[in-house]
Image (tube, helix red, strand yellow):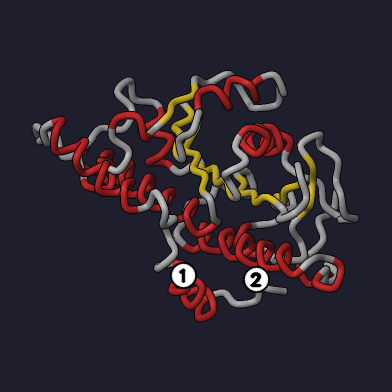
């Protein structure tokens, strides 16, 4: 099937609410930032955002478009039953629908979900011990702040949704064993910043292990204290609020046009 170009997509600004348009712009920016930082796997991962004011509706990437091409108007509006809610020349990644609908169905506090297949993330997902508290970034996820979900195959079976939901619980980060990483957030900026920390933690772990020398581990008390420092402050202040405007300025310099 031929895939339309973003430039061929009719603008939808006049067909959606102001709140939905702002969500579309931020989500398109998030896609392009993920591409900018190299967290892509061709066209095969996905980021979603809940549509404000529309119960059960969320936005997902147009399947077949590179993340650096995504625009606000090209995003596909879909519901948790898989029905496309606004005319689009695109379909969506079926595995992406399974994973993202699972989170949006269970976590009404969550606006955005990000899933990646980076090499460091996949490498850590394959390690028996998972993420280890080797760096400040990784200590953010110490203790009960990181979930794990066992690999079940490509996420095409809808009955996996209940197990994804149970494993994630009320957390904002999860390692999908032998697969990759998942983060979510109360805002798009929050999901992005949590993923940025998780990706950095995985990169650092693989680099440290490659050195071939014994590694230091801070004490459990220090690890728990560091995690509390991250999460206690952000209990009422979502991650990413300060950095997100800077990220948008970065895009405006290097890859503008996401707000079309």
Pick the residue in front: 189 or 253.
189
The percent coordinates of residue 70 (x first, y second) are: 67, 62
Q: Does residue 90 appear left or right of residue 214 in this picture?
A: right
Q: Nearer the viewer, residue 258 or 56?
A: 56
Circle 1 packing at 10 Å, graded few (<14), some (14-19), many (20+), is: some
Q: Residue reaching furthest bottom?
A: 253
Residue 91 located left or right of residue 140: right
Q: Which mark is residue 247?
A: 1
Q: Is residue 238 toward the left or the right of residue 209 in the image? A: right
Above/below status of 30 relative to 213: below
Where residue 169 sits in the image (x, y, percent)? 50, 28
Residue 213 in which image quadrant:
top left
Residue 165, percent from left and from top: 58, 27
What SS does tag 1 mark? helix
How many numbered discs, if any? 2
How busy is the neighbourhood of tag 2: few (under 14 within 10 Å), some, or many (20 plus)?
many
Q: Residue sitting at 19 percent across and 40 percent down?
A: 225
Furthest-right residue in this view: 87
C-alpha separation, residue under disc 2 versus residue under disc 1? 13 Å
Q: What residue does disc 2 label?
A: 258
Q: Which residue corresponds to the image point at 72% horizontal and 74% vertical from the top-left?
A: 260
Helix, strand or loop at mark 2 = loop
Label located before the other in sequence (2 or 1): 1
Residue at image x 40%, y 53%?
196
Q: Quadrant of residue 26?
A: bottom right
Front in this rendered view, residue 41 or 176: 176
Q: Is residue 186 left or right of residue 106?
A: left
Q: Are marks 2 and 1 in contact (CB under 8 Å)?
A: no
| Residue at 32% over, 38% down | 141
């Amino acid at each position: 099937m031929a895939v339309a170009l973003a430039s061929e997509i009719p603008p939808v600004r006049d067909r959606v609410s102001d709140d939905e348009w702002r969500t579309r712009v931020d989500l398109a920016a998030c896609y392009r930032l993920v591409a900018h930082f190299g967290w892509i796997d061709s066209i095969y991962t996905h980021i979603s955002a809940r549509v404000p004011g529309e119960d059960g509706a969320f936005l997902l990437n147009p399947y077949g478009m590179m993340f650096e091409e995504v625009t606000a108007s090209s995003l596909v509006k879909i519901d948790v039953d898989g029905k496309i809610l606004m005319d689009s020349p695109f379909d969506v990644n079926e595995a992406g629908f399974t994973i993202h609908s699972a989170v949006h169905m269970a976590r009404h506090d969550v606006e955005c979900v990000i899933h990646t297949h980076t090499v460091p993330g996949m490498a850590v997902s394959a390690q028996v011990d998972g993420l280890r508290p080797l760096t400040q970034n990784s200590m953010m996820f110490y203790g009960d702040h990181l979930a794990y979900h066992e690999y079940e195959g490509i996420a095409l079976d809808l009955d996996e949704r209940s197990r994804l939901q149970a494993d994630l619980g009320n957390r904002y980060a999860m390692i999908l064993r032998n697969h990759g990483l998942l983060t979510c957030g109360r805002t798009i900026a929050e999901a992005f910043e949590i993923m940025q920390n998780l990706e950095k933690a995985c990169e650092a772990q693989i680099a440290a292990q490659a050195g071939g020398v014994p590694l230091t581990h801070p004490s459990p008390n220090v690890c728990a204290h560091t995690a509390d420092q991250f999460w206690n402050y952000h209990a009422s202040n979502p991650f990413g609020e300060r950095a997100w405007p800077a990220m948008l300025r970065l895009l405006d310099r290097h890859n503008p046009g996401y707000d079309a």
